[in-house]
Image (cartoon, grey):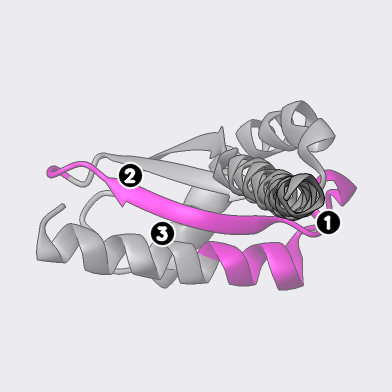
Amino acid sequence: MTIKAERVAELILNHLSQIFLMEARDPRLQGLTITDVQLDRELEHAQIYVNALGEDDRADDVIEALEHAQGYLRSELASRLRLRRMPLLHFHWDFSLARAMQMEELLDSIKENESLGSAGSDKQVDQGGKDEELHD
C-alpha cells in the first residue's frame, strides 16, 4: 500500500471502530473488532477484516449485518473523512485469531509430549544403568 492508502486505511479503521463502539444499534455488531483495513492504490476498494473474539460461530450473521449497514457506514465515513471518493467497503471475517489459538494449542501439546517423552527416556536410561550394575 502507498503511504496515503495506509493513512486512509488507519483513519477508516479508527472511525469504523468508533462507530461500532458508540453508534451501532444492530446487536449483531456488538463486540466487533476491526483487525485490519487494506486499500487498493486507487482508494476505491477497502478490504475490512473483522472478528468477534472467541465467537467464530457468529461470522455469517456479522458479515450479513455489515453488508446490510454498508450504505450507512459509507455515508458516516464520508462525513468524517475528506476524500474525493469514499471507497467501497468489503467486509471479511478474520480467522487469523482462531488459527493463532489453534497453533498455540498445537505447540503446547507438542511441548507436553516432549516433556513426557524426555521424562520416559530418562527413566529408561536409569533402569538400563541399574541393570548393568546388577550384572557386574
Q: Amino acid at mark 2?
A: Pro
Q: Amino acid at mark 3?
A: Ala
Name the side, left or right, on which 35 lies relative to 82.
Answer: right
Q: Which residue is mark 3?
A: 78
Above or below: residue 58 compared with residue 23: above
Mark 2 to mark 3 CA distance (whole Å): 9 Å
Q: Quadrant of residue 33?
A: bottom right
Which span of residues is magenta-colored?
16-42
Closer to viewer: mark 2 or mark 3? 2
Q: Quadrant of residue 113?
A: top right
The mark that comes first in sequence, 3 or 1, is 1
Q: Residue at x 71, y 54 (%)?
A: 122
Q: Which residue is mark 1?
A: 25
- Circle 3 packing at 10 Å, graded few (<14), some (14-19), many (20+), is some
Question: Which circle marks residue 87 in the picture?
Answer: 2
Q: Residue at x 53, y 37 (%)?
A: 91
Between 103 and 64, the residue placed more toward the observer is 103
Q: Residue at x 61, y 72 (%)?
A: 18
The mark that comes first in sequence, 2 or 1, is 1
Q: Residue at x 70, y 46 (%)?
A: 121
